[in-house]
Amino acid sequence: MSEVIIYSVITAVFVGVSAGYLGSLMVLEKMALVGDALSHVALPGLAIGILLNFDPLVGAFAFLFASAVIIWHLQRVTKISFEALVGAMFTLALAIGILLLGDNLDALEEALFGDITQISLLHVVAGVAISIAAVFLTRLIYKKLVLAMVSEDLAISKGISVAKTNLLYLFLVSLVVAVGIQIVGTLLVGFLVIVPAIAAKNISRNMTQYAALSAVFGLASAVSGVLLASYLEQPPGPIVVVCGIVVFAVSVLINWRKKTTL
Amino acid sequence: MADEKDVILKVKDLGVKLQNQILLDNISFNVRKGTTVAILGPNGAGKTVLLRALLNRLPHTGEIEWTEKVKLGYVPQYVAVSDVPMTVKEFLSIEGCTNPETALAQVRLTDKSLLDKRLGVLSGGQLRRVLIAWALNDNPNVLLLDEPTTGVDMDSEEPIYLMLNDIKKNQKITILLITHNIHIVEEYTDDLLAINKCVTYCGPSAEIAKPEIQRQIYGEPMCVETARGEA
């Protein structure tokens, strides 16, 4: 097995788990499209990195963080929904990214769909560390976020700062999205946040099971996609999506069977 | 007139203004320890705003003074549980409830199988009782309830208020609850605070039976002076 495949499988394991786990909250918050759209916000950062010859991931992180803060602040001030704000932000970012990379089609394709051959040991280490930190921190605020979802008043009555908790969560999603871009690219990383979670929701009996299955399905989609892509010599992004859809389809079947046997 | 030491909450000249709209104006009342106070008023009168102000959730003017160290329990009117795959047991454990069976028994839910049911599949009455159990989890001495029988059929309403009265007596807590039901005010609460952005009545709940008091509450807003009033 080549070094690149080992690197990409290790990254896929950690990114799959963290994207699935964090995505379970995105789906419950009815912010599924926020995760998807947020990933496109990284495009101008990637473009600037490519054009100015520094690690594009650093640019992606910077843009994602800045966007998370802007979106969070605008939401608090204007009370416009996260989805609408992220929608505006992501189309703007996509436009800027394409304008910056318009003449460089290879780089644009790499940014949109990911290029696993570019993964270095440093990326792997950063990806693993960031994924572990994101899962650990999300676990600490998971109950608070769920309570705020059930009722913001209820959460605040227990002394939870909902606004700050949401900001931290958006930061963590940004981190995971930035790492996921390496594998599936900006266009498809949102998939890893949404689909494992909705597949888990189909068959979970409780929250603990739901969070755990989201992570497992994220791992299964990412790892099987990367391995299959390497075998088929195809870009990993679309293959990860296909594998994830298979997982989702199986969950729909299980759910359907459960309902018909009741 | 209640003894000063019996008062647990003193509210003086409370005002809440959001986006240039006056939501509450010049609200003053006192709450006696160990009583149930009904908060009544037409839609948009500011009842929920008042509870949120008491929870210190809203910027306000005037004074809200709790006369002793209070621990507030809160039951909101609406919760979004239909889409969350959370069981009753998981919900109760959020606040560190170690004995969910006892917590449910306290609100007269004795069916143990409820613990593994999702919140979204509970009946209206069961859900309200679970929310009350949650609010009671860390032994509050004041319970704030925003329309505690929302989504509950009429037959199941009274048992919830009877239960709240028992909890009040057994645990010696003070209850402030929002309701639209005059019968509930009369039968199950001690004092009444009627508001329509300002105070329209403040006094014993039994007075609600009088037509002139009902006109005062539901007629044209007519603020009353309550600077020294007792709810």
Image (spheres, grey):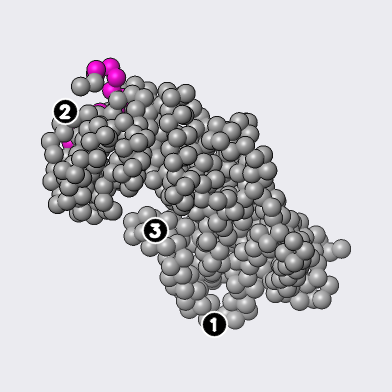
The prevailing secondary structure element of the residues shown in magenta is strand
In the rendered image, which quarter is residue A115 located in?
bottom right
Q: Is residue A184 left or right of residue A261?
A: left
Residue designated by label 3: A75
> Observer-nearest residue: B69 or B48?
B48
Q: Is residue A237 above or below residue B6?
A: below
Q: Which residues are magenta?
A: B3-14
Q: Is residue A168 left or right of residue B25?
A: right
Residue designated by label 2: B228
In the rendered image, which quarter is residue A221 located in?
bottom right
Q: Position of residue B144 (x, y in %)?
A: 39, 37
Residue designated by label 1: A103
In the rendered image, which quarter is residue A3 located in?
bottom right
Secondary element type, mark 2: loop
Secondary element type, mark 3: helix
Dots 3 and 2 on the same chain? no
- Distance between mark 3 and mark 2 Cα atoms: 41 Å
> Observer-nearest residue: A96 or A205?
A205
Q: Position of residue A162 (x, y in %)?
A: 45, 46
- Distance between mark 3 and mark 1 Cα atoms: 35 Å
* Chain containing mark 3: A
